[in-house]
Amino acid sequence: MKTATVSKRFIPHSLLEDVLAIFTGTLLVSLGVALFNQAGLLTGGTAGLAFLLHYITGWSFGAVFFVINLPFYWLAWKRMGWRFTLKTFCAVALVSVFSSLHPRLLHLTTMTALTPFYVALTGGLMMGVGFIVLFRHQASLGGINILALYMQEKRGIRAGKLQMGVDFIIVLASLAVVTPMALLASVIGAFALNLAISLNHRPGRYMAM
């Protein structure tokens, strides 16, 4: 009886709610990205790869992030459907644009030795909240996460292990471009991001359509 009552009360998100949520989520994630960028930090997944290329080549993070995600949309379409793929494409595009706009609109003071740890904590939590907003409206930021879910379904490779392996490779590669302190702060940021998601986005607690 309880399950039936809950399902009757469940109301899918409207188009306007999806639009506002994707705007809000990507704004939060991109602000966290901008803070990480200014502090010289990294994160995992596709964004981590984009950070590495940005630091090595000097190319715009937003442009690199957008291009890196392009090959993954086919997997998203095949596994998640066109609605998820369209929302994810829009989310990636907005993060790419916003992450380039924030440095022009938000000017921060010169970094001190302890600032990267503050940025890692606040930026990581901010990105985690942004991801939750996107997840609850059936969207993501594409990339490695989609690949991990696809490989788990088709090859039996656990998504968490594949994601962890990719993040580990990114961390090793980052040793060539960031300081040990920045790397430690990046690990703290990744922990904060995943903590925010794990505490607030659990199966059965929230249903989204």
Image: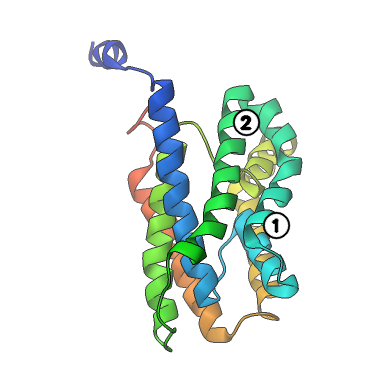
Q: Is any part of residue 181 visible from this angle?
A: yes
Q: Is label 1 in a helix, a strand or a loop? A: helix
The residue indicated by pointer 2 is 85
The reply, left or right, for residue 181 in relation to residue 62 is: left
Q: Assign the N terminus to one quadrant of the image.
A: top left
From the image, state whether disc 2 or disc 1 is nearer to you: 1
Count residues near mark 2 (Cα–Cα under 10 Å), then give few for <14, some for 14-19, many for 20+.
many
| Three-letter amino acid code at the position of disc 1 | Val
Q: Is label 2 in a helix, a strand or a loop? A: helix
Q: Are marks 2 and 1 in contact (CB under 8 Å)?
A: no
| Three-letter amino acid code at the position of disc 2 | Thr
Q: Residue at x 57, y 51 (%)?
A: 97
The residue indicated by pointer 1 is 64
**In this view, 67 is above or below 20:** below
Q: Residue at x 38, y 68 (%)?
A: 121
Q: Residue at x 73, y 43 (%)?
A: 70
